[in-house]
């Protein structure tokens, strides 16, 4: 199962640090690039084991549930077909289960501003306040003060 995480207009993907819970964005191409095998949280300067947002996790769980329900239903349906002419077993699969509605993943939180990390010649989008007070480069983990 694959969940597509949409990019914003500039090609950035929304990430959430699981250590501090804050959001930031890096380019989708950087996440898939071999040059950056690790991403540091620009706020706490640590490496989170996952940067998947809670929204994406929610969508993943819901689609897993939908897939599972569909599969179970298909097994029942199959059983119904196989036992159709069997006078000892009368099995009905019943109605197809309703799929859980999955809202499209937003690349929301647009109050983030692009920060230019000279150390890695790369950009990330972070909270304006952190841009002002200083942040950590998501690509090398170095302390970075733009101002
Ligand atoms: Zn963090
Ligand atoms: Zn850097």
Image: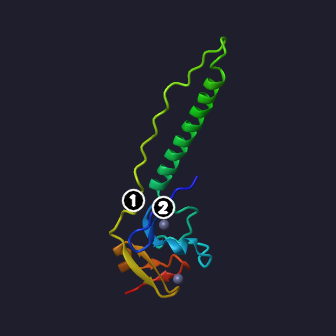
The tag earlier along the polypeptide, 2 or 1, is 2
Image-quadrant location for residue 7: bottom left
User: Mark 1 sits on what residue?
Assistant: 106
Instruction: Please determine whether, in this image, residue 4 is positioned above or below residue 79.
Output: below
**Which percent across, then down, holds residue 55?**
44, 54
Instruction: Please determine whether, in this image, residue 26 is positioned above or below residue 95.
Output: below
In space, the residues marked 2 and 1 are separated at their CA atoms by 8 Å
The quarter of the picture where the C terminus appears is bottom left
Q: Secondary structure at mark 1?
A: loop
Q: Secondary structure at mark 2?
A: loop
Residue at 39% from the left image edge and 78% from the top image edge: 114
**Which percent across, then down, holds residue 111?**
32, 69
Q: Is residue 125 visible?
A: yes
User: Mark 2 sits on what residue?
Assistant: 5
Relative placement, left or right, of 64 versus 85 is: left
Residue at 42% from the left image edge and 65% from the top image edge: 23
């Amino acid at each position: 199962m694959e969940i597509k995480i949409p990019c914003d207009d500039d090609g950035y993907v929304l990430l959430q640090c699981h250590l501090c819970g804050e959001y930031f964005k890096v380019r989708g191409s950087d996440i898939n690039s071999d040059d950056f095998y690790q991403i540091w949280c620009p706020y706490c300067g640590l490496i989170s084991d996952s940067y998947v947002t809670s929204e994406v996790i929610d969508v993943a769980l819901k689609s897993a549930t939908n897939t599972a329900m569909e599969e179970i239903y298909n097994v029942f349906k199959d059983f119904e077909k196989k036992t159709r002419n069997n006078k000892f077993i009368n099995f009905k699969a019943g109605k197809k289960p309703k799929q859980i509605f999955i809202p499209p993943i937003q690349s929301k939180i647009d109050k983030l501003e692009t920060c230019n990390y000279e150390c890695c010649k790369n950009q990330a989008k972070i909270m304006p306040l952190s841009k002002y007070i200083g942040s950590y480069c998501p690509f090398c983990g170095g302390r970075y003060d733009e101002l």
